[in-house]
Image (spheres, coloured by chain):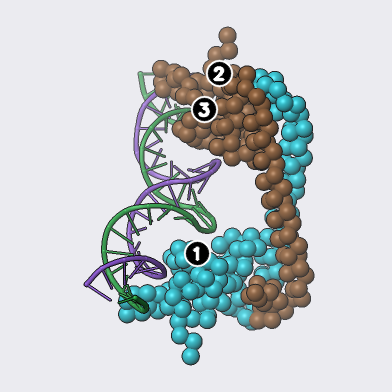
Chain colours: A cyan, B brown, C green, D purple
Amino acid sequence: MSHGTSIGGLAKATGTKVVTIRYYEKIGLLPEPPRTSGNYRTYDASHRERLHFIRRCRDLGFTLEQVRELLNLSKKTDRDCAAVDRLALDHLAEIERKIADLKRLEKELRRLSDCCQGGRIGDCRIIEALSAS
Amino acid sequence: MSHGTSIGGLAKATGTKVVTIRYYEKIGLLPEPPRTSGNYRTYDASHRERLHFIRRCRDLGFTLEQVRELLNLSKKTDRDCAAVDRLALDHLAEIERKIADLKRLEKELRRLSDCCQGGRIGDCRIIEALSAS
DNA sequence: CCTTGACCCTATAGTTACTATAGACCCCAC
DNA sequence: GTGGGGTCTATAGTAACTATAGGGTCAAGG
């Protein structure tokens, strides 16, 4: 007997903004829900689960295209799940690359900032270091 | 007697794409250079240095707005360089935050991926874990 | 002299994942 | 019946470019 939720209710239930839900619908990640007589969207548990899945993937840093693919894969229940694992591993590799990049930046920025002794900008080592090749 | 470089030459010299140089000009990060009779842009050493500075900041992950600010600061040579240092430190803090975030994701994704035992998608632990709250 | 190819010009639209705005409609309580 | 909150559509804006279309310029080779 679960009567439908309004878009605001779904938003609250999933920690998503209303506009974002409409956006997901527009790009085809969420199906168009039925409407009330007053043209309001009404959602049920399956919508809620799907949106929850999307948000969880997004929280883990998957792109919307990856989410789309995961959603497609999750429907093909009798297929080999290697494709799912590959997607996860690819994403993991990318995150590791990003971490490595950021650590390199961190090191260099720290070195940069350590140069600052106070004083006038004309003598600023940071500006100088940024200018250097 | 350094005669000017064409936009392509500047691009090559700084490892920047031609379109990106024009883009920087459009948003006011690079000054409009003089033109040849044939309406080609011509750049000199000062342009090259400024672009180099911009690219170096970008490589270090500063946003274009931060670069704009650094460029402004670097002109005010007799001001206190605390502002420069603050910008660098703010940026450093943000990078550290990002690293922490990504490490958290990495851990969770690794846990996710470790679940995969092969088999059919219907039984896939990854999909399951993504669905779980 | 003319053509060919590499380079350059402008202006516009597309990318990612939303966010913000405007102007209108619906619904419930008082 | 009126107020306020929620909802509707459509459009434009964000960061930092990238891509495309449709043309102009220039130096070299035939």
Q: Which residue is mark 1?
A: A17
From mark 3 to mark 2, how far is it between C-alphas?
12 Å
Circle 2 — which element? loop
Q: Which residue is mark 3?
A: B30
Residue A111 spot, x, y in % from top left = 77, 34
Other residues around mark 1 within 10 Å, as few (<14) / some (14–19) / many (≥20): some
Other residues around mark 3 within 10 Å, as few (<14) / some (14–19) / many (≥20): some
Left-right relation of C5 to A63: left
Q: Chain of mark 3?
A: B
Q: Residue placed at 67% from the left, 29% from the top?
A: B82
Q: Which residue is mark 2?
A: B44
Circle 1 — which element? loop
B130 lies above or below A66: below
Q: Nearer the viewer, mark 3 or mark 1?
A: 1
From mark 3 to mark 1, how far is it between C-alphas?
38 Å
Q: Amino acid at mark 2?
A: Asp
Residue A103 spot, x, y in % from top left = 75, 45
